[in-house]
Amino acid sequence: MQKQHFLVCPKCGVRRFLLKNAKGETVLVNVTRSLEIVPVNENDNIEGFDTEKLYCVGCSWVGSKHKLIKYLLVN
């Protein structure tokens, strides 16, 4: 099985994000390098969740999957 590579937060480098729905519920997700949003728990379903806005679990960053990066380089 091929190892999956995920995009990371442009601010802190964490690879896990939350999605929210209209009820305020959340689901923990990763984003693949092909920009596919996948739940961390394979039993979770992202249907009905807002996939346009990701909330980083490591910092205060909120944004689009298109703003994520492959690596966070720190000096």
Image (cartoon, grey):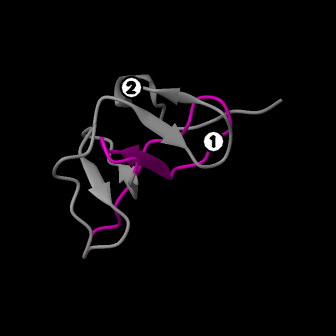
Residue 41 image position (x, y, % from top left): 35, 72
Q: Which residue is mark 2?
A: 64
Point 77% across, 33% down: residue: 74
Q: Residue at x 31, y 44 (%)?
A: 21
Query: Is residue 7 located in the magenta-colored stretch of the structure?
Result: yes
Give the mark nearest the N terminus, 2 or 1: 1
Q: Is residue 71 above or below residue 30?
A: above
Q: Which secondary structure dominates the residues rendered in magenta? A: loop
What distance separates the C-alpha of mark 2 from that of mark 1? Answer: 15 Å
Q: Amino acid at mark 2?
A: Ser
Say which amino acid is labelled 1.
Answer: Gly
User: In the drawing, does residue 40 fall left or right of residue 60?
Assistant: left
Label 1: which residue? 13
**Left or right position of 58 against 28:** right
Residue 73 image position (x, y, % from top left): 69, 33
Question: In which quadrant is the N terminus drawn?
Answer: bottom left
Residue 14 vs residue 1, the one in the foreground: 14
Which numbered tag is attached to residue 40?
A: none
**Residue at 59%, 49% in the rendered image:** 57
Q: Say which element carries label 1.
A: loop
Q: Where's residue 25, x and y in %?
A: 38, 54
Give me the residue at 24% from left, 76% from top. Answer: 43
Q: Residues within 10 Å of mark 2 (few under 14, many from 20)?
A: few
Look at the numbered disc 2 and give the secondary structure of its residue: loop
Most extreme residue toward the left is 47
- What residue span does the magenta drawing correspond to? 1-24
**Across the whole image, how many numbered discs are drawn on residues?**
2
Q: Is residue 34 above or below residue 63?
A: below
Q: Nearer the viewer, residue 17 or 35?
A: 17
